[in-house]
Amino acid sequence: MPKIISYRHDNKIRDRIPDGIQGKVISEVKNVRKLSLTKQLRDYLDFADSSGRKLHLYVRKDDGTKLSKSLQELIDAGRIKIFREIP
């Protein structure tokens, strides 16, 4: 059964179902050519920050997924950990 994360943001309750959640890690898999900082990823990051968790993002190997500047900045700042493992 998938784990649902619920949290309050701007006086609204938001529910999301990440690809994985275990202990202090929220995992999301994106098998796409281009990836930006979507509302979904911002929600996961907000939840991770507010609950003392880390966000792990899995994308295509090497340069198979091009990341937006704003997403890359969060990765560079250590707020999101990237794994380039999808073949």
Image (cartoon, rainbow, N blue to C red):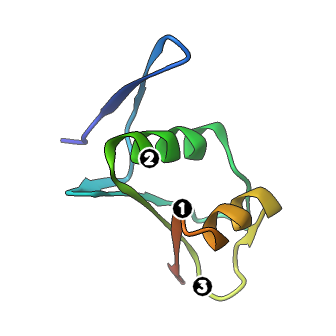
Q: Is residue 35 left or right of residue 15?
A: right
Other-residue count near label 2 (Cα within 10 Å), few / some / many at <14 / 14–19 / ≥20? few
Which residue sits at x=44%, y=46%? 49
Residue linked to disc 1: 79
Q: Nearer the viewer, residue 54 or 68?
A: 54
Q: Position of residue 39 (x, y in %)?
A: 64, 37
Q: Is residue 14 left or right of residue 33?
A: left
Q: Position of residue 33 (x, y in %)?
A: 73, 68
Mark 3 or 1: the one toward you: 1
Q: Which mark is residue 61?
A: 3
Tell me whether the residue at label 3 lies in contact with that at label 1, contact meaning CB atoms closer than 8 angstroms: no
Tell me whether the residue at label 2 lies in contact with that at label 3, contact meaning CB atoms closer than 8 angstroms: no
Q: Is residue 87 left or right of residue 25?
A: right
Answer with mark 2 or mark 3, whichever residue precedes in sequence.
Answer: 2
* Residue at mark 2 to residue at mark 1: CA–CA distance: 9 Å
Give the SS element for disc 3.
loop
> As displayed, is residue 42 above or below residue 83?
above
Other-residue count near label 3 (Cα within 10 Å), few / some / many at <14 / 14–19 / ≥20? few
Answer with mark 3 or mark 1, whichever residue precedes in sequence.
Answer: 3
